[in-house]
Image (cartoon, rainbow, N blue to C red):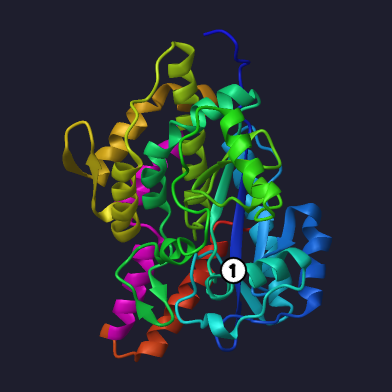
């Protein structure tokens, strides 16, 4: 293959957390300013506020191996938990809070967030959700857009592994990722459209920028996007993982998928193209069932248990996992499938509490306590 430079495939992970009050287990709708000052003193540019004051976001430095990412996530979660504890708070790595009300939240006093609240109106005010984003560097712009057009097939597979939002406003929703139902109300979300290349994307973006609807590409929130800040492909479909080892595993799988598609392109091959109509159906199945159900194998034209698809995916990216030295992280998705995702564990905690005689509120508080503990599990010193 000529005309493309080899990518570095370095990567980074961004995670968003919710802050809960340790006394009520409800969201801390207006935490003291000193909390964020403490986080900044510990983590500098790697931590920032989010749309609501009850949220906090971290972003790793550029990583070249999963051990590096694992160390950073552990350090950042530990630091945020330590700062939060000083104010009677705790972070939870879940994409929705089990019983919080969006009507009681306060958005962060920044121009960007004020503008978003004004533009989005009620759909913005309902956006009490958190996610995980993974950047993988593909420095050559033409190659980046070539791969961008092929990756969406795999996005439902990644979503299924990450699900952590089964509750919304005290309801067990029946979905493993209710977050997507909330997020899909926002414009410029969902699966990305297909572009012939960077030039077509830029022309479309320019129309919206010149019309005044967008400032720049950072206000495009597709499940996958060419980053507006870095030469990366930013995967955004996933819920935030309650366990950090699951976050690292999903990041490793995504990174390997990008390299696998690059290997195909280097041999003048491409992943078979499927319509957005079909991929959206798998997106819905992953949102509803997580890893506990089926996704559709479009080639066979039949549903396949996610456990079987996980094995096929591991085999598909085996060369890439070996190249990056992340075989252990990739293999960990079998553990996720076997043990269930955060959403599965949350529902079990809730139902077990109800079966033991807890009322609905007590059972939901038990879920919060579970999330507080799991968010920092394995993030001890060292």
Q: Which residue is mark 1?
A: 120
Kindly identify the residue that appears in the image at 46 percent across and 82 percent down.
99
Residue 343 picture location, percent across and down: 38, 64
Q: Can residue 191 be seen in the rendering of this structure? A: yes
Instruction: Classify 1 as above or below 91.
Output: above
Kindly identify the residue that appears in the image at 56 percent across and 7 percent down.
2
Kindly identify the residue that appears in the image at 71 percent across and 80 percent down.
31
Q: Can residue 326 be seen in the rendering of this structure? A: no
Q: Residues within 10 Å of mark 1 (few under 14, many from 20)?
A: some
Residue 277 picture location, percent across and down: 31, 45
Residue 162 picture location, percent across and down: 43, 53
192 lies left or right of 335: right
Instruction: Classify 370 as above or below 304.
Output: below
Which residue ends up furthest to the top in the rendered image?
2
312 lies left or right of 138: left
**Front in this rendered view, residue 224 or 198:** 198
Instruction: Classify 350 as above or below 150.
Output: below
Q: Which residues are magenta?
A: 326-354
Residue 363 picture location, percent across and down: 38, 84
Q: Is residue 282 magenta?
A: no
Secondary structure, magenta segment, majority class: helix
Q: Is residue 327 magenta?
A: yes
Kindly identify the residue that appears in the image at 47 percent across and 64 percent down.
185
């Amino acid at each position: 293959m000529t005309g493309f430079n080899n990518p570095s495939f370095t990567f980074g992970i961004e995670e968003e957390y919710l802050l809960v009050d340790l006394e009520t287990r409800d969201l801390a709708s207006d935490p003291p300013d000193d909390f964020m000052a403490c986080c900044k003193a510990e983590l500098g540019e790697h931590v920032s506020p989010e749309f609501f004051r009850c949220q906090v976001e971290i972003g790793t430095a550029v990583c070249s191996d999963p051990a590096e990412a694992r160390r950073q996530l552990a350090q950042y979660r530990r630091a945020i938990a330590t700062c939060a504890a000083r104010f009677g708070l705790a972070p939870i790595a879940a994409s929705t809070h089990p019983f919080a009300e969006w009507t009681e939240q306060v958005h962060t006093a920044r121009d960007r967030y004020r503008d978003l609240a004004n533009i989005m109106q009620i759909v913005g005010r309902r956006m009490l959700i958190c996610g995980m984003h993974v950047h993988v560097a593909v420095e050559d712009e033409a190659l980046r857009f070539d791969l961008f057009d092929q990756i969406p097939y795999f996005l439902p597979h990644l979503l299924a592994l990450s699900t952590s939002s089964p509750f919304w406003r005290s309801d067990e929703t029946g979905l493993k990722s209710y977050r997507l139902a909330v997020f899909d109300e926002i414009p410029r979300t969902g699966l990305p459209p297909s572009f012939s290349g960077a030039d077509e994307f830029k022309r479309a973006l320019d129309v919206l920028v010149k019309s005044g609807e967008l400032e720049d590409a950072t206000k495009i929130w597709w499940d996958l996007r060419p980053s507006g800040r870095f030469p990366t492909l930013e995967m955004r479909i996933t819920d935030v993982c309650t366990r950090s080892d699951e976050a690292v595993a999903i990041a490793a799988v995504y990174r390997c998928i990008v390299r696998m598609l690059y290997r195909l392109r280097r041999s003048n091959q491409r992943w078979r193209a499927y319509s957005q109509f079909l991929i959206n159906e798998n997106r819905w199945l992953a949102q509803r069932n997580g890893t506990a159900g089926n996704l559709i194998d479009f080639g066979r034209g039949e549903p396949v248990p996610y456990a079987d698809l996980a094995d096929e995916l591991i085999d598909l990216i085996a060369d890439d996992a070996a190249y990056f030295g992340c075989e252990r992280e990739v293999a960990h998705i079998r553990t996720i499938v076997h043990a269930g995702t955060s959403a599965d564990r949350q529902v079990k905690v809730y139902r077990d509490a109800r079966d033991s005689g807890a009322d609905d509120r007590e059972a939901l508080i038990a879920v919060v306590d579970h999330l507080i503990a799991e968010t920092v599990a394995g993030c001890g010193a060292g």
